[in-house]
Image (cartoon, rainbow, N blue to C red):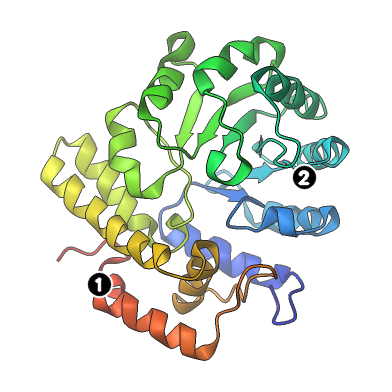
Amino acid sequence: MHADGSINVDVVPAYAEHLRRAGVAGVFVNGTTGESLSLSPQERVQLAEAWAKVCGPDLKLIVHVGDNALPVSRDLAAHATQIGAAAIGAMPPSFFKPAAGAVADWCAAVADAAPEMPFYYYHIPSMTGVSVRMVDLFPLAGRIPSFAGAKYTFEDLMDYQMAVEAEGGRFDVLFGRDEMLLSGLAVGATGAVGSTYNYMAPVYLRVMEAFAKCDYPAARRWQTRSHQLVQVLQHSVNGVACGKAILNLCGVNVGPCRVPLPQYTQTRMEALHESLKLIGFFDWKDGQDD
């Protein structure tokens, strides 16, 4: 955002290079951290197009297209196809909240607007209030030929593992709770999407690397870094706004959040900077050893 709350697409190339340097493999645009439901459809189109220009094989583009209005979701899905995105994802409507069967109906209607595009269900009950289990939703994927899996931002590890193992493991279930990544790896996660990866992705790559080597003490040590950071977010006035402020402090000038999310004044930024220094964030955010 610019200071006046309008979107700023000019920062996207620098943002993309920051993610590449951090070792990130893909970008999930217009999601929760991207304040998508505070943006107009036209703004979401502009942002998706800006990211499409800078993404490629080394930085895959997934576009979130969920909206309370089905026609908007379908239009955004079709647009994602036109700009060459790698996949689309969609959280369900959050005002009129659908039950399990209706979730499948809605997903099918969105995916049908981009039939060649891999479709991910965005499971984030803390924001949508829709808490259908993936183990109940995935069997309905037969109605959606492009159904690829889910972005799973929830704490139900049993449901998560069952989703990973469903139909012989054919679905890609991206783990979405940053502070629980190590737990997700233990029950089958092979990929993840998270907000704090914007500014400390190397820490999570260290978690994954240590887990793959069965070096569980190291994996826990790096996961603890995530816990320290998430506690800063939890004690802030708003986690999304705080995360965006941290990204600014890391040199990616993404600006403020849009109302109704809170603004970070200079005083609040200084206090945040001190909190981050206290936990050693600037010493280990890039995956440096102690």
The kind of secondary structure element at disc 2 is loop
Q: Is residue 266 above or below residue 186?
A: below
Residue pushed farthest bottom?
267
Of the two numbered discs 1 and 2 in the rendering, the one whose residue sits closer to the viewer: 1
Neighbourhood count class around disc 2 (C-alpha, 10 Å): few under 14, some 14–19, many 20 upward: some
Q: Nearer the viewer, residue 52 or 201?
A: 201
Label 1: few (<14), some or many (≥20) within 10 Å?
Answer: some
Q: Nearer the viewer, residue 92 or 129?
A: 129
Residue 217: x and y in percent read: 11, 45
The reply, left or right, for residue 7 in relation to residue 203 is right
Residue named by callout 1: 279
Mark 2 residue type: Ile
The CA span between labels 1 and 2 is: 41 Å
Report whether 185 appears left or right of 21: left
Position of residue 222 measured from the top left corner of the image (x, y, whole percent): 22, 54
Say which label, 1 or 2, has the lower sequence index. 2
Q: Residue at x 39, y 56 (%)?
A: 201
Instruction: Please state if 163 lies on the left or on the right of 211 as rendered.
Output: right
Q: Quadrant of residue 67?
A: top right
The residue drawn where x is 72% and y is 68% is 9
Mark 2, residue position: 83
Pick the quarter of the image with the C terminus: bottom left
Q: Residue at x 42, y 21 (%)?
A: 164
